[in-house]
Amino acid sequence: MRSLSLSPSVVVAVYAHPDDADVAAGGVMAQWASGGSQVHLVVVCDGSKGAHGSQTTPARLREVRRAELQLAADLLSVTQVHVLEVPDGEVANNDELRAILVGLIRQIQPEVVLGPDPTATFFGGVYVNHRDHRETGWALLDAVAPAAAMPLYYPEHGPAHQVKWLLLSGTHEPDVVIDVAASIDVKVKAVLAHHSQTGDDAEGVSDVVRGRASQAGRSLGLTFAEAFRSVELAS
C-alpha cells in the first residue's frame, strides 16, 4: 500500500447509482475540484428502484434521487453530471453502454477515471455487491482499456483518448490511498444529501463515513483517506 498524490486537470467518475460516487470517492472528487480540476460525474442508473418498502413509486423516487444527486454534486463542486437513465437493475456491459462511455471519455478527455472494481462481489459475509455496480465496472474497464484509446473502436465517437490513471473503488485489492482529510467534511455532507438512502440518522451515517475513511488511511498514518486499486495506463 502506498499514498498516491495526483493533481489531474480533468477527471471522470463513472458509477451506477446517484449516491455511489459520493460514498466511494466523494473525498477525492471534492479535493480535486477544490484544487481546480474539472470533475465530471457519470451516473449510469436512474435511481428508480433504490428503496425498501413500497411507500413511493419508481417515477417519484427517480425525481427525488435526481434532486439529491444534483445537491451532492454541487457540494462536491462537480463540473457536470451526466445521467444515462438506465433503469435500476438493468445495467449490462453491452455494446451500447461501452459506446456511450467511450464517447464521453473521448469528449471530456480525462487524465484520471474513477469507478467501481467489478471483481469485488462478496463483502464480509454480509453483503453481495449490486449487479449494477459490477456491470458498470466491467463496462468502464472495457471502455477505458482498450476501446477509448484505439481509434478503430467506435470511430464515430471521436478521436481516441488514452486515460492515464484508472482508480477502482470498493475493491478487495487496494494498492493506493489518497489523503482526504481536507475534504472529509464535504464528503459527509454529500453522502447525507442522499436522504432517501441515508434516512434520518445523520450522526450515525457521518460516523460510518468517517470511520471507513479513518480505517483506509490508518496503515499509512493518515487521518482520513480513500483506497483504490490503481492501474497506470500511460506514463
Image (cartoon, rainbow, N blue to C red):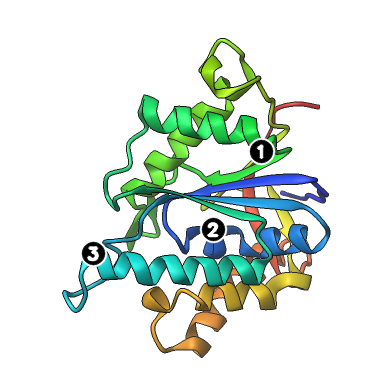
Q: Spot the residue most to the left.
A: 54
Horizontal and vertical percent for residue 178?
74, 56
Question: Where 30 falls versus 43 (above or below)?
Answer: below
Q: Spot the residue most to the top.
A: 152
Whole-angstrom CA distance, mark 1 to mark 2, is 18 Å
**Who is closer to the viewer here, 218 or 54?**
54
**Who is closer to the viewer here, 139 or 101?**
101
Q: Residue at x 75, y 26 (%)?
A: 234
Q: Regarding mark 3 in the picture, which secondary structure is present there?
A: helix
Whole-angstrom CA distance, mark 1 to mark 3, is 31 Å
Quadrant (top left, top right, bottom left, bottom right) of the C terminus: top right
Question: Where 203 falls versus 65 (above or below)?
Answer: below
Whole-angstrom CA distance, mark 2 to mark 3, is 21 Å
Q: Amino acid at mark 1?
A: Ile
Horizontal and vertical percent for residue 88?
30, 53
Tag count in the figure? 3
Q: Amino acid at mark 3?
A: Pro
Horizontal and vertical percent for residue 26?
62, 63
Q: Residue at x 42, y 56 (%)?
A: 17
Q: Is residue 173 visible?
A: no
Q: Which residue is mark 1?
A: 108
Question: Where 183 falls versus 179 (above or below)?
Answer: below
Horizontal and vertical percent for residue 94?
35, 28
Occupied quadrant, residue 155: top right
Q: Which residue is mark 2?
A: 21
**Who is closer to the viewer here, 102 or 16?**
102
Q: Nearer the viewer, mark 2 or mark 3?
A: 3
Left or right: 226 in relation to 49: right
Q: Which residue is mark 3?
A: 58
The answer to whether marks 2 and 3 mark residues whose Cβ atoms lie closer than 8 Å is: no
